[in-house]
Amino acid sequence: MKNIQNPMFDDFTFSKFAFVIRIETPMRLPIYKGGTLRGGFGYALKRTACVCKGATCSDCMLNEKCVYSYIFETSPPKDSKFLRNFSDIPHPFIIEPPLDGKTTYNPGDHLLFNVMLIGKTIELLPYFIMSFEALGRNGMGVNRGKFSVMKVKNGENEVYNGEQKTLSSSPYIQSASDLSYQQYIGKDKITLSLLTPLRMQHKDKLTDQPDFHVLIRSLIARLCSLAYFHCGITLDLNPKGLISEAEKVSIESNNTHWHDWQRYSTRKQYEMKLGGLIGEVTYTGDIEQFIPLLLIGEHIHVGKGTSFGLGKYDILSKNDG
């Protein structure tokens, strides 16, 4: 089985954790739960990790050493050689909510969601567990339904037991170079299923077309910044060359549509519109050279709002030849 043979990807690491929570009191959640989970997590993390209560992160002297600031209000270090002019950089985590559309939960019901941690953030898993436990005690959703964290799994291994409050087993850390591309060799066509709203910008505007070169631009930008800030590596991907080649790939069929979704941000005190493209799109052209990016993108998502779980896609087609 052939894997991505590029040493630059060896140190781009990530690990997925499945949280299983048990509902303790009646709970009502929106159809798309990513915003509620991320918002509740951020609130609980700040209460758990913040030392300087009441101070804004930008004014805090512990800003660059604070777990909350690093995870949730991620900004470039002052000596950064990359994205220094950006106020925020990609968060080092992704919350993947269940997509079952269920909104009403009763005591005894279970809810499962995934948390993807990237690079050095994997070591901060205990903060995620403690924060979700605190959120469960405080309550979540419209009616502040309470829940408990039953367990956290990493693949087949249980890394946290909620009944015993024990953290065990070192997580399996996956490298991007572990991803197999055997089934894509010689491919000139590929279909992506956009599972959660895909929000891509081109020329500083959201686009309602899933053009391949825009997708590749977004993937390159996200991957390079995650690698630099959260894995400590600089990826030499030749963006200009890849984008030039991506512009030659065309859309064979486009069965996507714009799906509007919005949430209220307690931290920012306003309603956020987070609509994007969902559905299926098939591309045709010289696809094989982009497979490493597309495979990694399945894990790290793409576009804006990824920490809410937006920009999740699956590669549907394998080898058509």
Image (cartoon, rainbow, N blue to C red):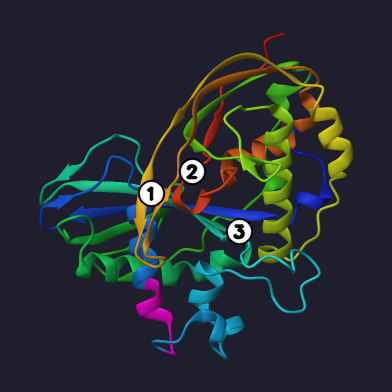
Q: Could one spot residue 293 in this view of the protein? A: yes
Residue at image position (85%, 29%) is: 245
C-alpha separation, residue under disc 1 versus residue under disc 2: 8 Å
Q: Earlier in the sequence, mark 1 or mark 3?
A: 1
Secondary structure state at the residue bearing disc 3? loop
Estimate how packed mark 1 is, as few (under 14), some (14 to 19) or many (20 or more) residues with alpha carbons within 10 Å: many
In three-dimensional space, the C-alpha distance between marks 1 and 3, rounded to whole angstroms, equals: 16 Å
Q: Give the amino acid at mark 3.
A: Pro
Where residue 124 appears, as percent x and y from the top left, is: 51, 70
Q: Is residue 250 above or below residue 229?
A: above
Q: Is residue 9 magenta?
A: no
Residue on which disc 3 sits = 90
Mark identifier at residue 310 = 2
- On the image, the x and y values in percent for residue 20 come to 30, 52
Q: CA distance from mark 3 to mark 2?
A: 13 Å
Q: Which residue is mark 1?
A: 34
Which amino acid does the dot numbered 2 rest on?
Leu
Residue, far top: 321
Q: Nearer the viewer, residue 245 or 160?
A: 245
Q: What is the quadrant of the N terminus in the image? A: top right
Boundaries of the magenta span:
45-52
